[in-house]
Image (tube, rainbow, N blue to C red):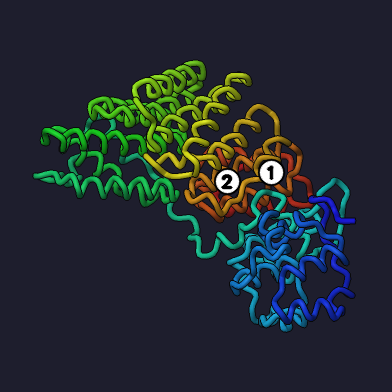
Amino acid sequence: MTGRANDLIKIPDSLWQRPETTAALRARDIGRFFALLRQYAGASQTQIAIACGLTQGKVSDIMRGNQQVQALALFERICDGLDVPDSARTTLGLAPRATSRPPVSAQAIPPRDTRPALAPPPASALLNLDPGDRQEDDPVRRRTFVGLTGATIVSAMLDGVPGPGAPVDAEPLAPILAGHPDGTASVETAPDIAVLTAAATSARRQYQACRYSELTKHLPGLISRLHAACVSLDGEDRLRAYALSADVHHVAAGLLLKLDDQGLACLAADRSMRAAIASEDPLMVGASARIITHTLMNGGHLAAAIATASSQATRLDRDVAAHTPESLSVYGSLLLRGAIAAAQHDKRDTALELLTEADDAARQLGADANLRWTAFGPVNAKMHRVNIAVTLGDAGTAVDVARRIDLSTITVTERKASLLIDTARAFLKWGRHEKAYLALRAAEQTAPEEVAGRPSVHRLIRELLASAPPSIRRDAEQFAAQIGVSR
């Protein structure tokens, strides 16, 4: 009888001694090997998928012979996930783990014989799926646990991610947004729209990559240059300059909201909407309405935020004769922002209604894209369901939805980190402190500045510290100190 998805695979030593196992490994027939795991270890396809960082569908295809495992990296992942012994690895044609295992810094959870400066909690505490379940520190348990957090392939995604940089300083934005530039920014005598477009695109990419300290170095000067372009250009170039200004002010407002600077964020959001209207681009107006909604939410004006998102989405739907992928992306993103505002206002029915409409737009779009910098699509809509569920107090639902999201499909770093943070929130509300800790660790490794620089994440970490059980308290405190969270 195969095990349940949440059960851990217990591979008997005798499996590695069986001639059919040796034959399957020698032939690199992973489908046959998985079938033997099912037969002699009682492993289900879902359990194998979780341990190996695959989807259940892919495991099924491999077992039925519809797909063949050929990539060396995938053989390594499967062997690491199932803790295949060195003798079996050699039969498969791989090097023993002593020479093939990646360095500790590249792994989401280091092997048990090491303890880096920022160490994960003891495995005996981290890997319990139920209270009181104390078992030995086992690599298969570690990898299965990571899968259950919704971060199945975190270790594969985090290689080479830079550490936290200098603290983000948004003060240089204050005089620019207040209309009193300090005069130090160089303004082009003849604004070049192509150059400004490239600079605005770079700013967006830095924001979505969570490189906030780098972004703040260039943002004030770019805002000044765009202001000059809006004044001095004419015709289509002027309209384009206004559109770029709307987008860059949107970026500034988003950054300021992350830093809890409500006053400057309001200024930036207002500048974004004014420039969007001047651009005469209805999609830009809709995009700027998103940041207006977000700013109203953060200020506690939830009813106004819901009304803004809903009315602007309706207006966009009315003004567009036939939806394009770009208009669907802006429209759906507005609905999602309104749904979050409704959840924060404890308007469950409204939140679910807006979510349903956004899901419909995502289905029409067909796949996730980053059109108009929205990152909108079916997966993005599902990620918002995680946020909304935990906001409404449905922690179990939030975790269940998060489990079904493949992190490898999320290409925008800021969105990926946000999902991990929302998953941590859900685990904490559910009383699963170890899993909340691991989700925060994964978020920090994915986007260091998103975790180290955001006051809201610091508050979440303090909640974890306040209620963490002894088994992970020392590790949680070490993590908090590492990223500068004060008690």
Residue where numbered disc 1 is placed: 465
Residue to which mark 2 is pinned: 485
Q: Amino acid at mark 1?
A: Leu
The Cα–Cα distance between marks 2 and 1, rounded to whole angstroms, is 10 Å
Relative to 215, 50 lies left or right: right
253 or 382, nearer to the observer: 382
Residue 168 coordinates in the image, percent (x, y): 41, 46
Q: As shown in the figure, which amino acid type bears the numbered disc 2? A: Val
Residue name at image x 53 percent, y 31 percent: 360
Q: Is residue 354 above or below residue 130?
A: above
10 Å crowding of disc 2: few (<14), some (14-19), many (20+): some
How many numbered discs, if any?
2
In which quadrant will I find the N terminus?
bottom right
Q: Nearer the viewer, residue 463 or 362?
A: 362
Residue toward you, 123 or 30: 30
Residue 381 found in image quarter: top right
Answer whether residue 363 is visible to the viewer in this image: yes
